[in-house]
Image: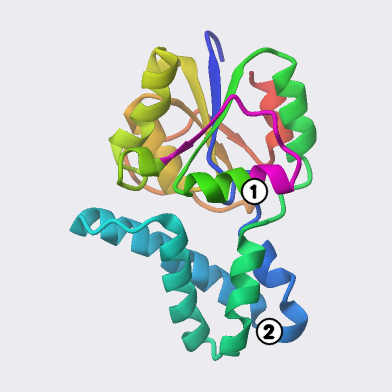
């Protein structure tokens, strides 16, 4: 991959494990913790897409809380656990290879940034709580008031860095986000952590990796 000036990462599911909040409570939730966590995540994403379509924007933290409320009712989770789960969502664990990979990339003098649905405060807390202060910028959809995969979101780093779309390597574990960034014009790389099937959304990524460490073989 040539002429790359900026490497831009999605946050949730790409750098940070969205299941880690529920996993830390699995003794209280029981064997359904993973199904509950996956449902929470799916509902959260559905709410971002639906609110974008309806033009009824709420920030990602409010959507995270709304989707948790529904998910707890569906799985009959003790309502008293809500605050604990939300607090843990603010400090999600990074995937094991993330810190080392980011430090190695930083030495190569690329612009490194996050582009995420998360609010600035959520993203800053995730980065600081995990000692990942290697990013040049942390971009939030709150700058444009609509969620991914709207093209206005992918515009944010291109305008900030004054570079061409083709000079961006964009990494996401979310297939719809890879398609969004790829159709926009980024060199979109799919972080396929769970060996799943890619979506049919008019984009097929040239590069697929199963963890971020393999990015070093591409860049």
Q: Is residue 162 magenta?
A: no
Q: Residue at x 28, y 56 (%)?
A: 57
Mark 1 closeness class: few <14, some 14–19, many ≥20 residues within 10 Å: many
For the residue pair 172 and 67, the one nearer the viewer reads as: 67
Quarter of the picture containing the N terminus is: top right
* Percent coordinates x, y for residue 9 in the rendering: 56, 35
Mark 2, secondary structure of its residue: helix
Q: Quadrant of residue 34?
A: bottom right
Q: Residue at x 41, y 64 (%)?
A: 63
Q: Which residue is mark 2?
A: 29
Q: Is residue 171 left or right of residue 100?
A: left
Q: Which residue is mark 1?
A: 126
Is residue 35 among the parts visible in the rendering?
Answer: no
Is residue 43 among the parts visible in the rendering?
Answer: yes
Q: Is residue 162 left or right of residue 213?
A: left
Quarter of the picture containing the C terminus is: top right
Q: Is residue 172 above or below residue 55?
A: above
Furthest-left residue in this view:
54
Q: Disc 2 or 1, which lies upstream in sequence?
A: 2
For the residue pair 136 and 27, the one nearer the viewer reads as: 136
Q: Which residues are magenta?
A: 127-140
* Percent coordinates x, y for residue 121 in the rendering: 53, 48
Q: Quadrant of residue 24?
A: bottom right
For the residue pair 146 and 186, the one nearer the viewer reads as: 146
For the residue pair 62 and 68, the one nearer the viewer reads as: 62
Q: Quadrant of residue 91?
A: bottom right
Q: Are marks 2 and 1 in contact (CB under 8 Å)?
A: no
Q: Residue at x 75, y 16 (%)?
A: 107
Label 2 – label 1 distance at C-alpha: 24 Å
């Amino acid at each position: 991959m040539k002429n790359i000036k900026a490497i831009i990462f999605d946050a949730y599911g790409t750098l940070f494990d969205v299941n880690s909040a529920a996993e830390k409570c699995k003794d209280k939730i029981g064997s359904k913790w993973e199904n509950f966590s996956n449902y929470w995540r799916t509902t959260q994403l559905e709410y971002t897409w639906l609110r974008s379509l309806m033009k009824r924007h709420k920030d990602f933290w409010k959507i995270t809380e709304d989707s948790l409320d529904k998910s707890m009712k569906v799985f009959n989770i003790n309502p008293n656990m809500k605050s604990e789960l939300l607090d843990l969502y603010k400090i999600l664990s990074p995937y094991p290879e993330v810190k080392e990979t980011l430090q190695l990339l930083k030495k190569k003098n690329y612009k490194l940034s996050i582009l995420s649905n998360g609010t600035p405060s959520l993203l800053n807390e995730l980065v600081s709580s995990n000692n990942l202060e290697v990013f040049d910028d942390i971009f939030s959809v709150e700058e444009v008031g609509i969620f991914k995969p709207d093209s206005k979101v992918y515009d944010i780093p291109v305008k900030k860095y004054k570079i061409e779309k083709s000079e961006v390597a964009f990494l996401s574990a979310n297939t719809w986000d890879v398609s969004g960034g790829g159709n926009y014009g980024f060199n979109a790389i799919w972080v396929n952590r769970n060996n799943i099937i890619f979506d049919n959304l008019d984009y097929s990524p040239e590069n697929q990796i199963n963890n971020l460490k393999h990015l070093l073989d591409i860049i």
